Amino acid sequence: DGGITQSPKYLFRKEGQNVTLSCEQNLNHDAMYWYRQDPGQGLRLIYYSQIVNDFQKGDIAEGYSVSREKKESFPLTVTSAQKNPTAFYLCASSIGGSGYNEQFFGPGTRLTVL
Amino acid sequence: AQSVTQLDSQVPVFEEAPVELRCNYSSSVSVYLFWYVQYPNQGLQLLLKYLSGSTLVKGINGFEAEFNKSQTSFHLRKPSVHISDTAEYFCAVSGAGGGNKLTFGTGTQLKVEL
């Protein structure tokens, strides 16, 4: 089955620790995205990548970092500089980087910082 | 810049009744419009999309939406809802020529009651 996997599903960390969220896709998609979801705020774009070894900041990139060393992988690191990291994080991918390309979403990772 | 407004944060409806979830957008360029559904603690699934052509778009699970350029709206409708339609629904817009950056509304929680 083709799709997007995110791991872990639930993640707990102490304040001040960096944490990396995994996102893998086997859809052979060029573009990948990270969103943050908070109650009542919809989804907000953190980072996106349209091609391997290239990525751009989204609307709320501060306190986050990404890498895109392989086409199928786009890990997100939540650093200690992120002031309010507790949220639901969603990874997505699309076949291309055009506005008409449908984005496919993974099941999400719920991060709780204690 | 583009934005999406979903005025109704919650919509309660009885089973087998019709429902309309409202979505209005603003953009300075031509748009592509999407509706996604999210079940609790899961990722998003595409219901339908408008790219061009016919303004009435049919999607999965019996949902449809109508693109109205003059009113900058893309309301989602279903003639008869089921308990299983209880979920959160997100309207999203991307702009032609602006890459694949999706802007999401804040979501509408549809609660179907017996």
Image (cartoon, grey):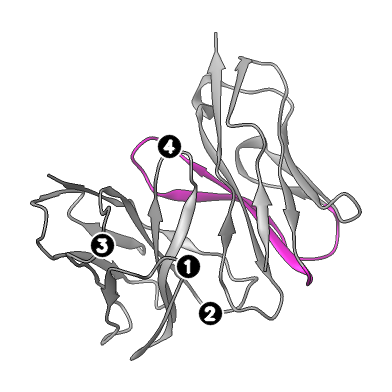
Position of residue A101 measured from the top left corner of the image (x, y, whole percent)? 59, 71
Q: Secondary structure at mark 2?
A: loop
Position of residue A60 measured from the top left corner of the image (x, y, whole percent)? 41, 65
Name the residue that disc number 3 marks.
A82
To the question of a shared chain for discs 2 and 3, the answer is yes
Q: Earlier in the sequence, mark 2 or mark 1?
A: 1
To the question of a shared chain for discs 4 and 3, the answer is no
Magenta-drawn stretch contains B36: yes
Q: Earlier in the sequence, mark 1 or mark 3?
A: 1
Q: Which mark is residue B39?
A: 4
Q: CA distance from mark 1 to mark 3?
A: 14 Å
Q: Chain of mark 1?
A: A
Q: Amino acid at mark 4?
A: Tyr
To the question of a shared chain for discs 2 and 1, the answer is yes
To the question of a shared chain for discs 1 and 4, the answer is no
Q: Secondary structure at mark 1?
A: loop
Name the residue that disc number 2 marks.
A96
Q: Chain of mark 3?
A: A
Q: Amino acid at mark 3?
A: Gln
Name the residue that disc number 1 marks.
A59
Q: Secondary structure at mark 4?
A: loop
Residue range in magenta is B28-55
**Would residue B78 appear left or right of A57 to someone viewing this image?**
right
Name the residue at 75% across, 58% down.
B26
Q: CA distance from mark 2 to mark 4?
A: 26 Å
To the question of a shared chain for discs 1 and 3, the answer is yes
Badges 4 and 3: C-beta atoms under 8 Å apart? no
Position of residue B57 measured from the top left corner of the image (x, y, whole percent)? 76, 50
Q: CA distance from mark 4 to mark 3?
A: 27 Å
Q: Amino acid at mark 1?
A: Asp
Q: Nearer the viewer, residue A66 or B110?
A: A66
